[in-house]
Image: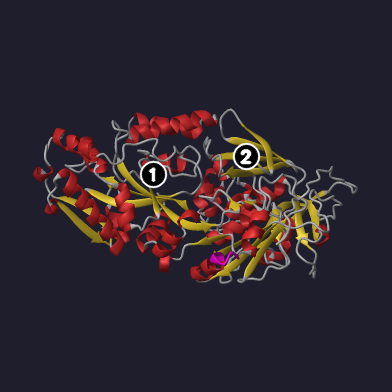
Amino acid sequence: MNIRHMLKYYFRHQAGCGGSKALFLCLLVVLLLFGCQEAEETPVTATVVSLPAEQEVIVTRLVLQTQTIQVPVTPVVVMEEDEELVELDISLQGEVSTLDPQMGVEDNDIDIIENIFASLTRYNHITNSFEPELAMEWEVSDDGRIWTFHLREDIYWVRREAGQATLLGSTPSELIPVRPVVADDVVYAIQRACDPRIPTADIQVMFIIEGCETLNRAPEVTAEAFSGIGARAVNDQTLEITLTTPASYFQAITSLSQIHPVPVEHVVEMGEEWAGIGNIYMSGPFVLGSQTLPDTRTVLQRNPYWPIPFSGNVDVVNILHFDDEMDAYLLWEDRNLDISPVPAADQTGILSSQEQKVKIVPEQAVFYLAYNFESPVFSNPVVRKAFGWAIDRERLIREVHGGQALPMRHLSPPGVFGAPPIGEVGSGYNPARAREQMASSSYSDCRLMPPITYMVSSSDLALQQAELLREMWQEELDCPEDVIVIEQVQFGTLLASTRSDAGAARPDMWDLGWASYYPDANNWMQDVLHCSHSENRQNRPCSEVDTLIDNAAVTDLPDFRIDLYRQIERLFFAEDGIEAISPLYARAEYVLNHAWVQFVPASFGGEQYDTYVIDVALKSFERSR
């Protein structure tokens, strides 16, 4: 379990909850015309300079560059002059810090990157499955380590004509297709992500690619270290990636922004300036509009050269940037935004007055109560179940977290491949069975137990949660208050004290949380609960469930993987399960949306605006009222 990752999300937890007639776009599917000769591939020497200004390290290495050519491509989307654009009006809190896929960290960055860059594969938030995008299809070698992707030939790098100031969307002529996206662009993206001089977020998920960890941890960046990375362009449309170990969940990693292709020659030529608004080459379903103003508004327009049909109908996305959520809400209330956050300052009043327009969006962060298997109390699975089943999660969410969470009876949250629907797996709150379990334990009565140390972090919210859980155990299990000793410590101390080798410093139970690195249940079952592949802070001995986790991580049959994860969750959290931890809740946030917009929010990664549907007639009518 990565400490920085837990710290990031646990800190968030502790911080608290903070007129016109409708017309539709005419899509004309046409054949792409290739009137020029094919791009000639020539090896060039690329000089790559590290980004941190305080440490200018230069390394020269050989890359394969596809020459920049002007390709006469017929736009896939043809706009009629009198056609009304379908616009999505939304907001983001704060600015966009970077549009570089390998360097995006914040949610705002990822939202834009997701829409202006093609990804190797795409995670469908509606079906919780992976779909082709740049990669049309792929196969895996018999040993599970070599993945071969076959790429489309009709996804292009597009740039905006310099000095172009025409009205947004009036014509595709202001956008110039440069060349197709090719396998070398993906290879180069992987090299950049693994390069220690590039501040790629959560880079450890890429260590499954052969040579990536070696390069990232190298004391000195060398051409030899780059050549050891297991990513190879067989030709322009064939990409080969070699893994360190078989991993069926690698499909999830191929959808991440860290692996989004970037234009090799443009990045080499422009350096860190390549992703600036005036310089950027884009390849996604949307491109930056000419009306984009840094830190004020971001405008996205449908990429006329994007070959994959939209499932939504949005042509333009108008994104206003606010520092204060209340400013966005007031615009939404006046029907000038389609979607708005719920300001914390007046959350209760707004939720009450806008009840029919509230949507709760789960985040990829689950918080849980963990048990020390070496504790004289919680070494007994019967007692673990009694304590877990006595927790009223709905009450916890209501009284401590302001309703901004979803109750969890199993671990994998909504929005990841393999996660069961909430409420399908696990026992959850069952006070009658909790009392039966306690009575059948070797203690028979909570009042006969030795003192139990319950360790939490030092925030007021953590203490409030712990005190409420203790109150529930008092009410449901007759536990005396002095039996459960709440110990507040700094978060670093909490992590240190719950290490598997912490010895006598280990508490009997504690609170922790986990958030996804990639949208697959493996990131939860293996990385949090496996007896040897995770940190196993509970010191749970290995059992049959770990074998199932291993099998789910390597089988390439999606339906079988889903079934395995159901079995694994049941073995942990069903009535006869292990109950190594007791999941409590998944963090969530409230959003407000008017009836004229239909969308499925992205629980992981950036929003996919090409899936949003606007009822243009209803929006126009409501705004005219």
Say if residue 35 shows up in the picture.
Answer: yes
Q: Which residue is mark 1?
A: 528
Residue 216 picture location, percent across and down:
54, 54
Residue 581 picture location, percent across and down:
31, 43
Q: Earlier in the sequence, mark 1 or mark 2?
A: 2
Q: Is residue 89 left or right of residue 341?
A: right
Q: Which residue is mark 2?
A: 131
In the structure shown, which secondary structural element does the residue marked by tag 1 occupy? Answer: helix
In the image, the segment drawn in magenta is 332-336
Amino acid, disc 1: Val
The span from disc 1 to disc 2 (Cα, nearest Å) is 27 Å
Q: Is residue 18 left or right of residue 283?
A: left
Q: Residue furthest right?
A: 35
Say if residue 197 shows up in the picture.
Answer: no
Amino acid, disc 2: Glu
Identify the residue at image location x=63%, y=68%. 297
In the structure shown, which secondary structural element does the residue marked by tag 2 occupy? Answer: strand
The number of numbered discs placed on residues in the rendered structure image is 2
Identify the residue at image location x=68%, y=50%. 313
* Frontmost residue, 233 versus 247: 247
Q: Closer to the observer: label 1 or label 2? A: 2
* Frontmost residue, 103 versus 513: 513
* Frontmost residue, 411 versus 553: 411
Quadrant location, the C terminus? bottom right
